[in-house]
Amino acid sequence: MVILQTVDLERHAGTAMLLNRVNLSVDKGEIFAVIGPTGAGKTTLLRLINLLERPTAGDIYFDGEKITDPSINTIHVRRRMAMVFQKPAVFNNTVYENVAYPLKVRGCHGKTARSDVYNLLEIIGLGGYAKRKARTLSGGEAQRVALARAVVIKPDLLLMDEPTANLDPGTVKMIEGLVMEFNRDRGLTVIMSTHDMQQAQRVAGRVGVLMNGQLVQVGKPGDIFYAPDNARIAGFVGIRNLLKGYIVRNEAGIAVVDIDGRYIEAVSDLPVESAVEIYIRPEDVVLTTLVSASSARNNLSCTIRSLSPNGPLCTVIVDCGFPLEALVTDRSAVEMRLSQGQEVYASFKASAVRVLPSMQR
Amino acid sequence: MQEIWQSLVQAVNLIISLDTEVIQISLRSLYISALSILIAALFCVPIGALIHFHDFRGKRVVINVVQTFYSLPTVVVGLLVFLFISRSGPLGGLELLFTPAAIVIGQVILIMPMLIGMTIGALNGVDKAIRDTALSSGASTAQAVLAILFEARFAVVGVLILGFGRAISEVGAALMLGGNIRGYTRVLTTAISLETQRGDLVLSLAMGIILIGIAMVVSVIMNILLQRY
């Protein structure tokens, strides 16, 4: 059942188009992540849904009700939602008063309200902090208070705008855990924006990619991260190997793609002579010093052009007649004694190659 | 120098001995200025909030004009109010001239620009995210405004204390509108002015010390508040 839908939603700021005909549909009880680079319009989208801003064009439906209608009771709608902002704003008051604020503005002061607040403080790991000044909390603690303040009213929809940006990994894990727990235990619907792609994969059931104000792809995390619809999305979700070629043969759904004279086998139904773009995730490319005995259909001899150690991983660029990026663990790179100019083999499965029809031949 | 020192000692004695006239004048000063700041706050804090929360054409100009009137000369305020409440003025029938009420009116007008302007400044200092947080928490516009005012509470109280300081230390309006009538409209500043002219330096000094004491207390309270803010 759809809880939130946007129809041709637009938001302009002067001549700049912050959101351009966004059509989004979120189901009740799901965690939906909106990913996109900085300035893509993620915050604007969430603020429009929360009615903190008005759209220039288009409509938003919440639980079947057109909430962009000027006659709508804004407070009534907002009181069914909650929002956590990127920068956690806490009132200059105690932690208890901060979490209790949404209850207070709704006129709930009773014993139940008080115990709800204390229960939530326990859940978020700030049980002994009720009387502490919220301004003295760390960034992570303040964000947990903001999350508790958002869920204390048991909203139908929780909006989170990059809730873990600039937080330490431990706090990120805790906040993600809490969000998933609230989603699982209370059936809370969540729309969260993030530019952390791993987070979107960890937390969300579905992901929408927002680029330059346009929702360019919506799907399960696997679809977005392994089968992006175009080169722009592929580049954003971290697929480095974007190659152009054309299909020279296709037998039973296994296409042979000519890339600058080298042949790559890929799973595709596109006909022979189709101009295509192919994407391969660097982590799907396996480097060996001997011809691989694996079942991978693609085994290309190539020369190492560069090695860039990056923490526990090492990015290796090889020349197979075209540049190909591979990701190996730093330990493997040392064990294999990989070095610049070395001859190696790059292998990857036909199913690891995403093939899309090219816009230009 | 000897004379000044002796006067100072006598003045302190006058305060310690709780001289009836000194105490009465001091309490009257406190009462009139406190009433002025209370009335001015009732108008000015909401007006300041209204200007802060609404975007309109010429907002910047309005704020600049308000700020210009911070240094409104007290005698000019006295003169303007005098013209209105004197027997031949449009409000002459109310017979306010040379009453404590006239001084209150003068002081309210005197401190209004300062209170409005500084309330706007205090609200500007509140993080914009507080408004969004309040609204997205389900607050009505009025509740969100209250939340923002609450955030700026120490700064707003600081503004009120500054306004009180300006009111209690002014002499022009109190003299022109109150008339410095003994036992009725005589306040600390007008009394100091009069007693100095009459040569009663001891009484002047005693009241001067009290006025400085009040200013010091005001300053200490304000510093404590600002530190907490």
Image (cartoon, coloured by chain):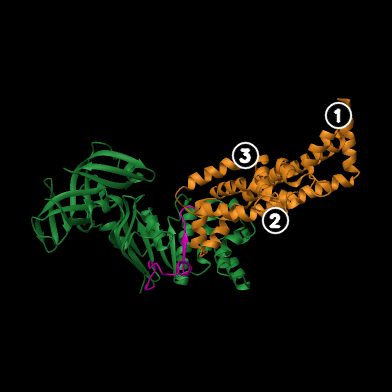
Chain colours: A green, B orange
The residue singled out by tag 2 in the image is B93
Chain letter of the residue carrying label 3: B
CA distance separating discs 2 and 1: 46 Å
* Helix, strand or loop for disc 2: helix
Whether residue B220 is visible, yes or no, is no
Up/down of B120 relative to A94, above or below: above
> Observer-nearest residue: A123 or A74?
A74
Q: Which residues are magenta?
A: A63-88
The residue indicated by pointer 3 is B71
Position in image of residue A205 (x %, y %): 36, 65
Residue B4's label in the rendered image is 1
| Chain of the residue on which disc 2 is drawn | B
Quarter location, residue B174: top right
Q: Is residue A155 above or below residue B25?
A: below
The x and y percentages for residue A28 are 39, 71
From the viewer's perspective, is B11 left or right of B61?
A: right
Task: Look at 31% across and 47% down and name the residue there.
Answer: A328
Q: Residues within 10 Å of mark 3 (few under 14, many from 20)?
A: few
Compare residues B183 and A114 and report the one nearer the observer.
B183
Q: Amino acid at mark 2?
A: Gly
Q: Earlier in the sequence, mark 1 or mark 3?
A: 1
Dot 1 amino acid type? Ile
